[in-house]
Image (cartoon, rainbow, N blue to C red):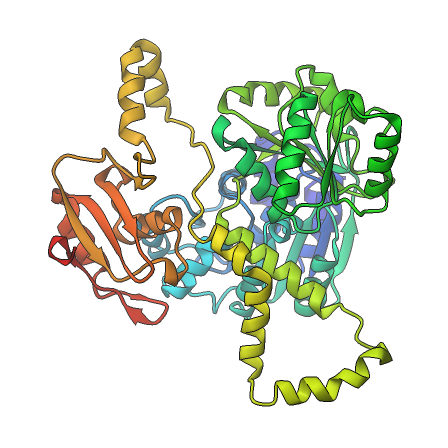
């Protein structure tokens, strides 16, 4: 089978030849002829590394009219890294097509430049869900004429809590002619999305190219040493249905972390060499019965464990022996099920991750440690789903219904829901409402090279980018110098925490992070230190704009304190 035989036009076949693609991969061979019709919905199940981008990118380029300078196709994916990868590949595929433009829009960078790119005229937009919704709400992008929507790595997006975002995006593309969904697995959430928004989709399934650990998704998160425990807690909270094993290097760590998590209300116990056989049997019995949601273990103690249905393995620390990693990750993804293996690492261990990656012959995905608000959202979804799935057909509830109706006669449905949420989540929301960003950011190549030449430069850079002073308040710049203080009528009540508020301010003003100093957030308003040379630009960019329907006020604010 050749690309020409799939029905691709001459320019695209020429591009595949130039890239050295001689034969289509299985997912390309099966998907491309279906997608070229332009009117057929498709669900493609295939692992990473099977050529999915070409499977949907080539048909998109053939179906889209380059003469029309407005968005005709939308590709939604979970991370900025994948977003950029997709754009780079499509750029290669369109080498011999003139007038075709592709734009990537994703968070973590200035939104102004992306808006300008969109205004220049594009046919294909590749986006992460959060940034795309931000652009929709700002009316910076019009999706009315989108004909084709691609959801790439849909299971990953749902795993990250983007189900509502995906549905919002699909609702805002009412004139699409077809929807193409690509995923490594088919969890119930994806099945529900496909039934709700797709019409009799063609379903294609292909095997994974790399056979090692074929059912396990390998992920890693970069955190500082002092934040490793908090990162662990956040990953557990972000996966409320988790049933897994946490691995530590030492029995002392296993016991200490288990005790700490138990005090904080987690259903967990430790398995290590100091336990008697009776104690070990008791712990394993509770874990198999799912009385325990989590088991924390050392490698020695975990030998011989064979428990079905484990959803996650978490490496609190990477093992010293690279081969041990395969034994840990093999605890999940058994008997045809899929699983996730997470590793919490220090930035100095990225080389070790690459070594393991080569050994197991599957790609590792670097993911962000979830923000506090994302954890809360994920927990809410899980709670609501469980609530809706409760069996209420038991007759034993009937005698209490009149009493309930009388008690809640004057209470509205909205108030009942609020009280239910407050009862279940008050302490949880309080804990995460101002949660800090736990991710370690890599320094730029410029600074890495500079630091290698002059050790003093590292100290200087560290001082400039320090995130917190002794009172625990965040800094975006040098924490001093010729700064002025601005008042803005946005605060934590608007759903912001410090990291998201900082990103919001930078996106709105197109300023660099080093132009900001201290940010002091309150419930109803905030104060921002900004370089005096940039203060006027920030006020002009933000003052008078709207956020969730109300006007933003920003002005010089020293007199308000």
Toward the top, the furthest residue is 453
Give whichever of 339, 523 is nearer the camera: 523
Percent of width and height locating residue 385: 68, 64
- Give the residue displayed 36% in from the left and 61% down from the top: 140
Q: Is residue 19 visible?
A: yes
| Residue 395 versus residue 373 in the image, above or below | below
| Residue 265 versus residue 37 in the image, above or below | above
Q: In the displayed structure, does residue 550 sit left or right of residue 182?
A: left
Give whichever of 19, 388 is nearer the camera: 388
Quadrant including the N terminus: top right
Give whichever of 184, 206 is nearer the camera: 184
- Give the residue displayed 35% in from the left and 51% down from the top: 501
| Residue 328 versus residue 203 in the image, above or below | above
Percent of width and height locating residue 265: 64, 47
Quadrant including the C terminus: bottom left
- Give the residue displayed 65% in from the left and 68% down from the top: 197
- Give the residue displayed 67% in from the left and 35% down from the top: 258
Q: Is residue 7 visible?
A: no
Q: In the displayed structure, does residue 89 sit left or right of residue 476?
A: right
């Amino acid at each position: 089978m050749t690309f020409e035989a799939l029905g691709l036009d001459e320019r695209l076949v020429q591009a595949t030849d130039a890239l050295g693609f001689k034969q289509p991969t299985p997912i390309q061979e099966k998907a491309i002829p279906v997608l070229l019709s332009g009117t057929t919905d498709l669900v493609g199940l295939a692992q990473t590394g099977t050529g999915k981008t070409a499977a949907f990118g080539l048909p998109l380029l053939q179906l889209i009219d380059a003469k029309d300078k407005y968005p005709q196709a939308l590709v939604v994916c979970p991370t900025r890294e994948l977003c950029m990868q997709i754009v780079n590949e499509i750029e290669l595929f369109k080498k011999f097509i003139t007038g075709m433009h592709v734009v990537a829009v994703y968070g973590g960078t200035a939104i102004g430049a992306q808006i300008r790119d969109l205004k220049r005229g594009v046919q294909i937009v590749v986006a992460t869900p959060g940034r795309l919704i931000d652009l929709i709400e700002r009316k910076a992008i019009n999706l009315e004429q989108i004909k084709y929507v691609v959801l790439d790595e849909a299971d990953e997006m749902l795993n990250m809590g983007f189900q509502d975002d995906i549905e919002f995006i699909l609702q805002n593309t009412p004139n699409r002619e077809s929807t193409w969904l690509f995923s490594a697995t088919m969890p119930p959430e994806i099945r529900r999305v496909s039934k709700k928004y797709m019409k009799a989709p063609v379903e294609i399934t292909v095997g994974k190219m790399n056979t090692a650990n074929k059912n396990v998704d390998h992920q890693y998160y970069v955190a500082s040493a002092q934040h490793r425990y908090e990162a662990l807690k956040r990953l557990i909270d972000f996966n409320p249905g988790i049933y897994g094993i946490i691995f530590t290097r030492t029995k002392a760590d296993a016991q200490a972390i288990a005790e700490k998590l138990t005090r904080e209300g987690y259903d967990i116990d430790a398995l290590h060499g100091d336990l008697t056989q009776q104690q070990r049997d008791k712990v394993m019995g509770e874990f198999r019965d799912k009385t325990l949601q989590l088991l924390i273990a050392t490698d020695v103690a975990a030998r011989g464990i064979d428990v079905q249905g484990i959803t996650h393995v978490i490496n609190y620390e990477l093992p010293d022996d690279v081969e041990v990693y395969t034994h840990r990750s093999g605890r999940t993804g058994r008997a045809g099920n899929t699983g996730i293996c997470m590793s919490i690492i220090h930035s100095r261990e990225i080389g070790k991750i690459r070594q393991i990656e080569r050994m197991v012959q599957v790609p590792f995905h670097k993911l962000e440690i979830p923000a506090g608000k994302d954890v809360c959202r994920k927990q809410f979804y899980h709670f609501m789903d469980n609530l809706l799935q409760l069996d209420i057909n038991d007759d034993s509830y009937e005698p209490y219904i009149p009493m309930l109706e009388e008690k809640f006669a004057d209470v509205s449905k909205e108030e009942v829901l609020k009280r239910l949420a407050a009862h279940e989540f008050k302490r949880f929301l309080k804990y995460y409402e101002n949660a800090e960003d736990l991710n370690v950011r890599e320094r730029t190549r410029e600074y890495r090279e500079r630091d290698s030449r002059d050790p003093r430069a590292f100290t200087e850079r560290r001082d400039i980018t320090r995130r917190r002073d002794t009172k625990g308040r965040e800094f975006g710049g040098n924490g001093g110098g010729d700064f002025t203080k601005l008042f803005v009528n946005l605060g934590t009540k608007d759903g912001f925490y410090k990291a998201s508020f900082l990103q919001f301010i930078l996106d709105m003003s197109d300023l660099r992070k080093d132009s900001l100093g201290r940010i002091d957030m309150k419930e109803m308003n905030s104060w921002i230190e900004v370089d005096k040379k940039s203060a006027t630009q920030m006020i002009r960019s933000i003052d008078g704009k709207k956020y969730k329907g109300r006007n933003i006020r920003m002005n010089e604010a020293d007199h308000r304190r």
